[in-house]
Amino acid sequence: MQNLDWAVIQTVVWTLIKIMTIVVPLMLGVAYLTYAERKIIGWMQVRIGPNRVGFQGLLQPIADGLKLLMKEIIIPSGANKGLFILGPILVIAPALAAWAVIPFTDTLVLSNINAGLLYVMAITSMGVYGVIIAGWASNSKYAFLGAMRSAAQIVSYEIAMGFALVGVLMASQSLNIIDIVQGQSGGLHQWYIWPLFPLFVVYLVAGVAETNRLPFDVAEGESEIVAGFHVEYSGMAFAVFFLAEYANMILVAALTTLMFLGGWLSPVTFLPDGIVWWLLKTGFVLFLFLWFRATFPRYRYDQIMRLGWKVFIPITIVWIVVVGGMMQTPYGYLFH
Amino acid sequence: MTPNMTYTTAIFYFLAAILVLAGLRVITARNPVHAALFLVLAFFTAAGLWMLLEAEFLAITLVLVYVGAVMVLFLFVVMMLDINLEHLREGFWKTLPIAGPIAALIVFEMVLILGSRHFGLEVMGTPAPHPADYSNTKELGRLIYTDYVYAFELAAVILLVAIVAAIALTLRRRKDSKYIDPAEQVKVKRNDRLRIVKMQAEKKPGAEEGKA
């Protein structure tokens, strides 16, 4: 009995260490993603971007984090106190929990489960609660409007996103993310981006919408509703929303990489596979996110809804039928 | 009892306690938004229990569909409504004579089904745990698309009819809405919106003054 208890403790500690080795680099990635965003958008707009704190401004995210940590968290007197504090927690928890099943290479994964893709979809679909609760508990009209917009938008785009994933499932015949990546082995031309190109585009754009990023950031909409659902939050409570948004961005980029761009697989067969490819591809998708932000003006709300329901959902349904039909023909191998 | 067994049993009682508490709070919470959030917690905990039963597909789908979509819309509506609690509590004694027997009937049915006489360990036996590579999702898919394909298709068609009916019932064209057809917007050419007038940049000295 003594030995067994020791084994249990060992497993728990070992798992906690593994979780830390995912979360710490992720949080650093989030910090430097904000830096990259400000630098890249600066260059795109012929500005310099942050360059004062540290060499080339490299310590800027650390300075920002410290500043937010020191600030007071103000809870509005009319707010629903418990839910007000629960809001940011419910936003960041799913954003981190989803990383449990994300593989970095075919062996480097915290939990390799059969229904990995379903798990990611279920967990990320819960992120919207934090936004809704934060908006409602703030007891502010702007925050509430932001929360309502966010709820409607996320529910709408989740359908298109889910259908895009159904296409990936059909091609790979598996829900296990490692199996999905290994289904794409054999070089650049085997990646699912080619047979599933419409689904790739839908997934990427829906991912931008799900993370409330520009041009779909109506939940924040500075010019209309000040800062949307987090208008009443200050200090670290606000920073948690910020961390969650960027962690979700990295998550969507990682999922796009794993499902359409071959994950850790090398694009050419003579180079070895490895985590470097995973990082490069995810970095590229993240760059696309920043590029979108610098390029597109914000969508009008009714046009966001139209795009989600009347354009993306029909495209995904048609392409699922095409993939299913083609698999029954002699050309089916093109879709595997 | 093996240590593994006690571990899952402990998780079961932990989740079951949360589920019962959350379920109670759904009907006792004064604030309807709190009640809806407790319902979310109840669904999530129920998903955890299903996970213990090795029904991972059902568990994840419960979270995905009910927690991720249905309850979001539910909260959406509850938050928008101006609910008067006093007004809601008025009908309690009036509806009790009907609600009471129905509640008793439900309890009776549950006792009938869940009672140990028909579904106890002596009658049913413990189902054998599946190996780690067993895919509940795949088995479920196989059953739905082979043995139960007609029932499945029928359910799908009924749901589709319900969707179409719901849309048809609420569809109305408002005369006063300033709806713009995006196709029309895209088709606009420069000449529809803008007229370029050619004129000289500078007046010739003395040319205009003569008229004035």
Image (spheres, rainbow, N blue to C red):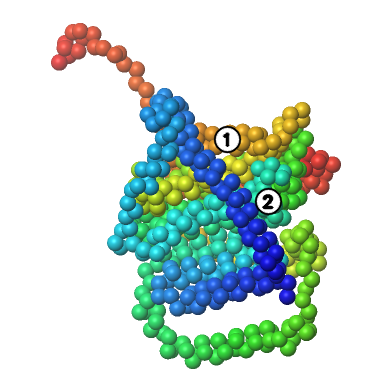
Determine whether A47 is above or below B181 in the image: above
Q: Residues within 10 Å of mark 2 (few under 14, many from 20)?
A: some
Residue B168 position, x and y percent, is 55, 62
Residue A283 numbered tag: 1
- Front residue of this view, candidates A229 and A1: A1
Is residue A191 visible in the rendered structure shown here?
Answer: yes
Of all residues, the one furthest to the top in this rendering is B205
Position of B35 with respect to B154 (left or right) is left
Q: Amino acid at mark 2?
A: Val
> Which label lies toward us, 2 or 1?
1
Q: Could you tell me which quadrant the C terminus of chain A lies in? A: top right
Q: Which mark is residue A166?
A: 2
Labelled pair 2, 1 in contact (Cβ < 8 Å): no
In this rendering, the answer to whether B93 lies above or below A292 is: below
Of residues A135 and B153, the one nearer the viewer is A135
Relative placement, left or right, of A61 versus A171 is left
B98 and B1: which one is in front? B1
Q: Could you tell me which residue is drawn at 51 percent across and 70 percent down?
A: B39
Residue at (32, 55) in percent of width and height: A74
- Dot 2 or dot 1: first in sequence order is 2
| Residue A312 % position (x, y) | 59, 46
Mark 1 belongs to which subunit? A
How packed mark 1 is, by other alpha carbons closer than 10 Å (few <14, some 14-19, many 20 or more), is: some
Task: Please tell me which residue is depicted at 52% across the width and 67% down the height of the picture.
Answer: B40
Looking at numbered disc 1 in the image, what kind of residue is underneath it? Gly
Which x, y percent locates residue A240? 44, 50
Percent position (x, y) of residue A93? 52, 55
Residue located at (77% from left, 30% from top): A269
